[in-house]
Image (spheres, rainbow, N blue to C red):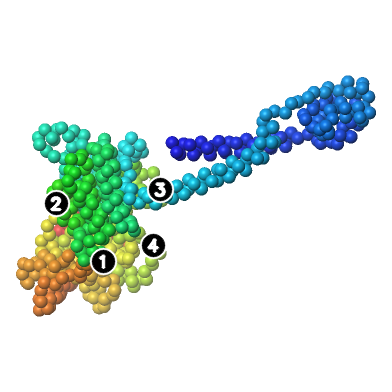
Amino acid sequence: MKNLSKNLVVGLLALFIVSLVFSTINSESNRAKNVSLAEAITQIQNGQIKSVQISGDKLNLTLTNGEKQTSFKESADSFTTVLKNYGVPPEKISALEISVKQPSGASLWLSAILPIALPVLLFIGFFWFMMRQAQNVNNRAMSFGQSLAKENEREKQKVKVTFKDVAGVQEAKQELVEVVDFLKFPKKFTDLGAKIPKGVLLVGAPGTGKTLLAKAVAGEANVPFFHMSGSEFVEMFVGVGASRVRDLFRRAKKAAPSIIFVDEIDAVARQRGTGLGGSHDEREQTLNQILVEMDGFDTETNVIIIAATNRPDVLDPALLRPGRFDRRVILDPPDLKSRVEILKVHSRQKPLGPDVDLNKVAQRTPGFSGADLANLLNEAAILAARRNRKQVNLSDCLESIEKVLLGPERKSHILSDQEKKITAVHEAGHALVAAALPHTDPVHKVSIISRGQAAGYTLKLPETDKHLHPRKEFLDDLAVMLAGQVAEREIFGDITTGAQNDLRQATRLARKLVTDYGMSELGARTFGMKDDLIFLGREITEQRDYSEKIAEAIDAAVDRFLKQAAETAKKVIRKYREALDAIVSALLDHETIEQEEFADLTKKFLPVKVKV
């Protein structure tokens, strides 16, 4: 109503100004010629004036030729008296068509009242506007403690997200479908003695679909849905966070049954007692209020809290106990079948060419999250549009995979002939060792075209999703990682800086074999207490639980893994030197070798069957 009144006043004022300007312009366009009274008397005596209209002191004259003129007389005398005083004959006066026009109320208002009233109205309007501004400032100052949560109104949603739009997380969907059913049909559960869950915590890596699932709940539930970010609770003023929590739950309880969704809850619900901030830390006060609202004395409410985080390790234990977050829903990266379903969902609005096989695209994207797959198809559509095509082809999708993994092609990054040959030898070493060893993933593509920070790349991907990795697989992977530098040394007798990232990854994997996986001769144990709680008062570095002697043994074990891997790569490269030369030659000629071409190229040199 306030907005309506304000808009009405502004509209009327604008209409008045437009009308006033229009009338002024219109009167100016129709303004007659102004003549003196003596000139008008002369024209009357000469019979040039047909009629006279008297409006107060103003004389509106119409000439015999139709022209309009105006003149003014003295206000004390009548027009006939003026004519007689100027000696106009009576027959000339009687020949005139004389009429008298009384002044209207509008003209009286415009001429007498408006000049006085307009400044007063302008002053009142300015004073009212200043008062409204001051009132708004006061309202904002007093609204710090109010919740910033936005209520989702399903009827007003332009694009509704439902559970049909969420693919690849069947278990998580089932948990949330039950939550929605609890709110829609509570009697079905209460008849069996079941209680509505207090909270559902969505846990998963970035891009796995936590917020998308919350949007689907909002689209499916016919109850009020309040959503906000965890960072919106905390302000610079002490106590504001707790006040906003109280206001949020008050609104939700008033609209019960309802749902509250808090995204990135780790921003406000981190573990207490970390050593800094004391008991009056603003985050702790806010968390305390959340704990009380979720499971305090007042527990008879039909409000469900859904929260999302990718850092469950930093959350306070009191928040995770039953009675607060009763359910913890884990969203894992999608497997092959789930990736196909996700690609189907994100390709609905994209015209795909007849050669597009989503299963093939899914096979090349292990480890991709739902957000990565959506970005992949979007990049493919952009690439097809850039090439002026009406459909997205398989080549667009495969090129987009490499763009998401490694970055765009650096066509301006031109290598010299020597650098190009070194890069070809380096990538051929990776590809050859990967094809020759029995426990490595198949080679899908080898290229010496620069992408991102890489001068070239070898793309090898698993045939199926893997959850357990044997020791033999890690040893072969180490050999593949070091094969590029080994090939450079074998061919050129020297090494370059191109293996920097390979060495970093190989060293990291070798250390994990020793310290995390227990796959070295040091025994089946882990070394080092790795605490992921990088927060206030926590150690960022690893906490050692072993002596300096053991540290030396760990370093020695890592070195043995790396030397053994380098020796394995050297044996393969020396044994199949002809295959290496053939791969290098093909790369120098074509710059890129695809999976089928690579298989045909190496099968005549290698005694084992190349995995394709």
- Provide the secondary structure element on which disc 3 rests: helix
Residue 411 numbered mark, or none = 4
* Residue picked out by circle 1: 427
Q: Amino acid at mark 3?
A: Asn
Residue 321 numbered mark, or none = 2
Q: Is residue 537 above or below residue 467?
A: below
Q: Earlier in the sequence, mark 1 or mark 3?
A: 3
- Provide the secondary structure element on which disc 4 rests: loop
Q: Quadrant of the C terminus?
A: bottom left
Mark 1–mark 2 Cα distance, whole angstroms, equals: 51 Å
Task: Choose mark 1 or mark 3, whichever is in front.
Answer: 3
Task: Choose mark 2 or mark 3, whichever is in front.
Answer: 3
Q: Amino acid at mark 2?
A: Arg
Mark 4–mark 2 Cα distance, whole angstroms, equals: 55 Å
On the image, the x and y values in percent for residue 401 come to: 29, 54
Pick whichever, 346 or 82, lies toward us. Answer: 82
Q: Is residue 472 above or below residue 153?
A: below
Residue 139 numbered mark, or none = 3
Residue 233 is left or right of residue 326, and the answer is right
Packing grade of label 2 (10 A; few <14, some 14-19, many >=20) is: few
Pick whichever, 339 or 566, lies toward us. Answer: 339
Res 116 → quadrant: top right
Q: Residue at x 67, y 40 (%)?
A: 115
